[in-house]
């Protein structure tokens, strides 16, 4: 027998158009309305949610904590952290790109147009763009690209040049090429199927971009192998970098200390909370996962 | 409008809703107005800085989560200098949870925490994941009596004692804590648990054992609160599986003067505020003027038959 979820305790979540009785808060619990939730390819779905205006006060690299419906008979107990894929302030919409893999994302995949979806956020420290940077390189794999998309949107708005290296298993799952190109990014797909995604080739591409003056900063998400590579090249060539990290979370606010990752700062190993100290960190301090 | 205020010894809470220690920190001010809570409960502090347990620290189960955090923190000096002021900005009383593995150190910590901005010391003698075996003071009457007596001798602050649901007879432990000078009892901590992954045959948590956090615990902890409240004179705070106002009512009927909430705040960050509002509405709808009228008001006077009699009577 499963525990019966209580409708009442989402009462203080804000819907689109609701009056905000506590505007001092910087994080909200919201009820978004599903506008669409469609397959992008065989593995990934793209959800568009209409949300309260306050939820739009978010920026690249931040995340929302999602209360996913259950894909089976049992409750999905904890929220699932997910980085923002796109913010459309004009339409009051937030978008997520996700892989239907675990129980949370499979439940999320079942939501239909018009359904409510409870999300808390925006949470965490996102990407920062130094005004001195004229050109950046983003390197992502799989769903990590979803996290780098709003960064590219932000960079494009600031007139920063973007090279996006999109890593995937095969051409069928190279996502977001059009989206990144829409931001004026030069895209370089690299694939497992033709070997272009292997470390030696990506290293050559990164060094080439530095040589051409197109790499004032590095950004990555989604692959430990690519993080190690970008960290190595960045260190050797003096290119600063940021990485967006993932970890299993409970609270999302920095209270529970579940989502720890190891970092190395001035030779000392330490633990940081991905939810509040990150999820975006200095690439040179990240140890990976 | 109902009066939601409750007394825990010398301390008045504006309502009976407090966060459970470990599940809360001042950072929740980002999402809720902390001034509305009955009390603020800081994460358990230890003497030395601790990184905590290895990851993963949480695993989902069929009816909740098991977690093993290991009391991370920056140590008592940093806590008093930097964390206490973060809480002191808010109006509700500050309840500081503290833990040690050593009686003398425990008492000394309580003394050092007895600073003006701290309103209550919560002796967490029941953390199931502080060490790898799950052992703690609250598993034994004698250990409980000894450590609480030592703490009592070193602080005049109200002393709340957090008991373990893993002890065989929590009523005896509760009595021991009361006799040793506790001002209130927090019942209970998490249930010692284990999850094993079937894909790689390894325990799911980095620390192997964890504490179960779940709405499914409520009936078990409610039974413990009921049993303890019948025999002690000091107030009891019920902690386990509260997700809605009716759960608070249930705990109060069983004899609790207040509740602690962990899980519900994880799942819905605004849950504590919703529960306070709903509790007020629940009382108002029934013409209940003071929430304290609910404490121990369970109607069971005609049910004092023992189970053998009940069985033979076919009940």
Image (cartoon, helix red, strand yellow):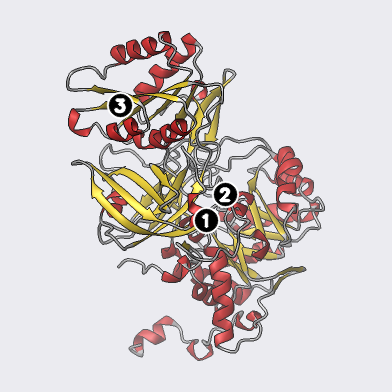
Q: Are marks 3 and 2 in contact (CB under 8 Å)?
A: no
Relative to residue B254, is residue A216 depicted above or below?
Answer: above
Label 2 to label 1: alpha-carbon separation: 38 Å
Give the camera-side residue of A197 and B95: A197
The reply, left or right, for residue B244 in relation to residue A22 is: left
Q: Position of residue A130 (x, y in %)?
A: 55, 26
Q: Is A184 situated above or below A11?
A: above
Question: Looking at the rendering, which quadrant does residue B198 occupy?
Answer: top left
State whether discs 2 and 1 lie on one chain.
no
Residue drawn at x 38%, y 10% is A207
The residue pinned by badge 2 equals: B136
Are the two marked residues, 3 and 1, in contact with CB atoms closer than 8 angstroms?
no
Q: Residue at x 31, y 43 (%)?
A: A98
Looking at the rendered structure, which numbered label has been put on residue A28? 1
How far apart are the alpha carbons under marks 3 and 1? 33 Å
Label 3 marks a residue whose chain is A
Residue toward you, A260 or B140: A260
Q: Is residue A274 left or right of residue B97?
A: left
| Chain hosting mark 1 | A
Query: Element under label 1?
Result: strand
- Dot 2 falls on which chain? B
Q: Residue at x 48, y 41 (%)?
A: A62
Q: Quadrant of residue B120?
A: bottom right
Which callout, 3 or 1, points at the residue further toward the start of the chain?
1
Percent x, y of residue A258: 49, 43
**Above/below status of B287 relative to B128:** below
> Counting other residues with Cα less than 10 Å from the Cα at mark 1, is it few (<14), some (14-19), or many (20 or more)?
many
Residue underneath mark 3: A166
- Asked if residue B166 shows in the view, the reply is no
């Amino acid at each position: 027998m499963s525990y019966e979820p209580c409708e009442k305790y989402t009462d203080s979540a804000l819907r689109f158009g609701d009056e905000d009785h506590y505007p001092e808060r910087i994080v909200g619990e919201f009820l978004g309305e599903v506008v669409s939730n469609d397959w992008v390819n065989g593995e990934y779905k793209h959800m568009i949610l209409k949300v309260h205006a306050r939820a739009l006060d978010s920026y690249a690299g931040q995340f929302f904590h999602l209360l996913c419906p259950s894909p089976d008979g049992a409750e999905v107990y904890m929220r699932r952290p997910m980085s923002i894929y796109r913010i459309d302030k004009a339409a009051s919409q937030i978008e997520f790109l996700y892989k239907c893999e675990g129980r949370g994302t499979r439940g999320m995949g079942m939501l239909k147009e018009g359904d409510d979806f409870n999300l808390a956020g925006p949470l965490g420290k996102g990407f920062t763009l130094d005004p001195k940077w004229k050109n950046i390189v983003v390197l992502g794999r799989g769903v990590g690209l979803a996290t780098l998309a709003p960064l590219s949107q932000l960079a494009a708005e600031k007139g920063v040049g973007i090279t996006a290296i999109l890593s995937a298993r095969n051409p069928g799952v190279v996502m977001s090429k059009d989206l990144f190109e829409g931001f004026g990014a030069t895209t370089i797909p690299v694939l497992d199927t033709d070997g272009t995604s292997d470390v030696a080739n990506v290293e050559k591409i990164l060094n080439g971009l530095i040589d051409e003056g197109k790499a004032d900063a590095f950004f990555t998400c989604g692959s430990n192998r690519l993080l190690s590579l970008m960290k190595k090249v960045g260190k050797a060539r003096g290119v600063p970098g940021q990485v967006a990290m993932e970890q299993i979370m409970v609270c999302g606010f920095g209270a529970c200390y579940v989502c720890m990752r190891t970092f190395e700062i001035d030779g000392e190993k330490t633990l940081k909370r991905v939810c509040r100290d990150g999820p975006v960190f200095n690439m040179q301090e990240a140890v990976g996962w | 409008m109902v009066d939601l205020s409750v007394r825990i010894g010398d301390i008045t809470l504006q309502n009976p809703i407090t966060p459970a220690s470990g599940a809360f920190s001042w950072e929740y001010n980002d999402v809720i107005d902390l001034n509305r809570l009955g009390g603020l409960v800081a994460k358990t502090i230890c003497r030395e800085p601790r990184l905590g347990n290895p990851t993963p620290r949480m695993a989902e189960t069929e009816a909740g989560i098991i977690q093993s955090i290991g009391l991370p923190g920056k140590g008592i000096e940093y806590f008093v200098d930097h964390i206490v002021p973060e809480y002191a900005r808010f109006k509700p009383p500050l309840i500081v949870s503290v833990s040690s593995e050593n009686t003398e150190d425990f008492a000394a910590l309580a003394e050092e925490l007895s600073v003006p901005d701290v309103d209550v010391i919560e002796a967490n003698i029941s953390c199931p994941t502080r060490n790898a075996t799950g052992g703690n003071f609250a598993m034994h009457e004698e250990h409980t009596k000894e450590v609480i007596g030592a703490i009592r001798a070193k602080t005049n602050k109200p002393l709340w004692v957090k008991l373990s649901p893993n002890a065989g007879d929590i009523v005896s432990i509760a009595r021991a804590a009361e006799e040793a000078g506790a001002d209130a009892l927090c019942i209970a901590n998490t249930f010692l648990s284990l999850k094993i992954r079937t894909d790689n045959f390894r325990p799911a948590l980095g620390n192997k054992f964890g504490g179960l956090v779940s709405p499914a615990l409520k009936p078990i902890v409610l039974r413990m609160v009921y049993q303890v409240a019948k025999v002690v004179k000091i107030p009891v705070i019920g902690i386990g599986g509260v997700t809605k106002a009716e759960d608070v009512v249930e705990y109060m009927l069983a004899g609790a003067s207040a509740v602690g909430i962990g899980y519900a705040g994880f799942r819905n960050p605004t849950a504590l505020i919703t529960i306070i509002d709903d509790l007020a509405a629940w009382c108002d709808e029934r013409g209940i003027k003071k929430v304290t009228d609910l404490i121990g008001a369970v109607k069971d006077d005609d049910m004092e038959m023992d189970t053998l009699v009940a069985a033979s009577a076919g009940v």
